[in-house]
Structure formats: structure tokens, C-alpha cells
Image (spheres, rainbow, N blue to C red):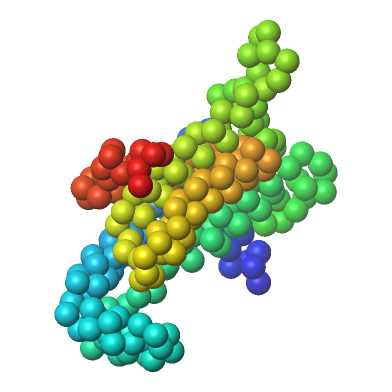
Amino acid sequence: MWTTLVVQPMLNLLLWIYSLVGNFGVAIIVFTILVRLLLAPLMHKQTKSAEAMRKLQEHPKWKEIQRKYKNDRERLAQEQMKLYSELGVNPFASCLPMLVQIPIIFGLYQAVILALGNTPAQLLELARLLYPALNPSRLIPINGQFLWMNLAYPERLHIPGLPFGIPVMAILVALTSYIQSKAVATTTPSTGEGQQAQAMNQMMTMYMPLMLGYFALTFQSGLALYFLTSNLVMIAQYALMGKLSWDDLKFWRR
């Protein structure tokens, strides 16, 4: 079911783009941009929801609920949900883009593995999953070389004289993920209280870039290319919406 509904369509879309552009790295970039454009309405909805949440937390009823039930967390949660319903605010709308992107990430990971496989068994599986409109004999085997990277393997940039390779993609993924996380943090209000909520936001802002950087370091560089392109497109979207301030990106900001 997973392969039929997620991996196979994603694989065929990637290879269709590859058949047009002739480079698998460029195909991943184009695919990523298409995904981000498709998710743009969800991102816009997420931003509107964050603005609604921010206005809600300034509402007199919200402040009254916080004051009245500050020692009764169960009743506080009930009254907050009532106010959400009364004012038409969905507190979970900001999670939707991330939930949608999770199957895309896992599906792309499997699609890259399948597309860049080089053993007879992998090539046979790839040919079996292609739609009839694509000609396997014309596409297979896939050329996975892009710039200095082989997209089927973890990326390292080897510089003459250095005894080790530099994980350029992992560094760029971590950096752009940090910028994106800071942009999201500044547009998404916290429903928590005081220092605890602030500490949670700071932890997520640092944790996500480190996790994606680790994925870029250890998994196929084709997946790292997806992460980097997706981050850059999202940063551009936030900047165009006026939701990105360089002051918010400082590591030392408190």
C-alpha cells in the first residue's frame, strides 16, 4: 500500500522530470520546488493560523481564563478549547505542513534508493515500479552524479591535501534548517507559559537542524539535496511574506 500510493508515484515523477532535464540532481531540485509550491497554500494557512493564535492570546477572555484557572490545568484546557471553538481558531493548523511533509521525506528517501540502485535485483525492482509511459531501457541505469556528489552515497567534498572529506551538504542543511526554524518560531506563538515554553521553543529550534544535518551526513546525498532545496525555498517564502528578520536569526538572541 505504501509503495503503491507514495513511493511509486514519487519515483515515477522524479524519473519523468529526469527524462526531461537529463540530470538526477536537477530533477530532485525541480521536484522539491514543485512540492513546496503544492504545499504553499498549507504554509499560508499555517501563517494565518499563527497570526490568529497571537491575536487570541491578547484577547481579554484568554487572559481571564489564564488568570482564573492557572491552578487547574484540566479546567484551563477545557476553557481554552471552548474559546478556540468560539473564535474559530484551530490550534493544530500549524502542524499540518510538517505532517504532510513526513511521508514525502520517507517516500523520497526510498525513491532515491530505488532510482540509484546498481545491483541486478535493484534494477529489476526499479523497472517493475515504472509506469508504462516511461521507457526503462532509456532511463536505466540512472546517472547519479551531480556536481561533486554521487547522489546514491553520503556527500563529502574531498580537497587535495586534506586527509578527510568535508560534509558540505550536512553543514548547509543544518544552517538553512536553523534559519527556517527561527523563521517558524517567530511566526508561531507558544501556548505554554513563561520560561518553560521559551525553553521548549529554543530546544526545537536547535534540535531540528541538528537532526536534519545528521540525516544529510549519513544518508544518500540525494536526500540532503532535497532538504537543502526545500529549506531555501521555504526561507524565500518567509522572506517574501515579510516574516523573516535577520535579527531573529542570531544565535545569541534571547
- The answer to whether residue 115 of the structure is visible from this angle is no
Q: Where is residue 19 shown, x and y percent of the image?
A: 53, 40
Work out which residue is located at the far front of the displayed protein and give it: 71
Residue at 27% from the left image edge and 45% from the top image edge? 244
Please tell me which residue lies in front, 12 or 88.
88
Residue 217 appears left or right of 227: right
Q: Where is residue 136 shown, x and y percent of the image?
A: 66, 45
Please tell me which residue lies in front, 84 or 6.
84
Q: Where is residue 108 shown, x and y percent of the image?
A: 58, 52
- The answer to whether residue 240 of the structure is visible from this angle is yes
Residue 177 appears left or right of 39: right
Is 151 located above or below residue 90 in the figure?
above
Residue at 41% from the left image edge and 88% from the top image edge? 72
Q: Identify the image quadrant of residue 9.
A: bottom right
Residue at 22% from the left image edge and 74% from the top image edge? 56
Is 168 located above or below residue 220 in the figure?
above
Q: Where is residue 89 shown, x and y percent of the image?
A: 27, 78
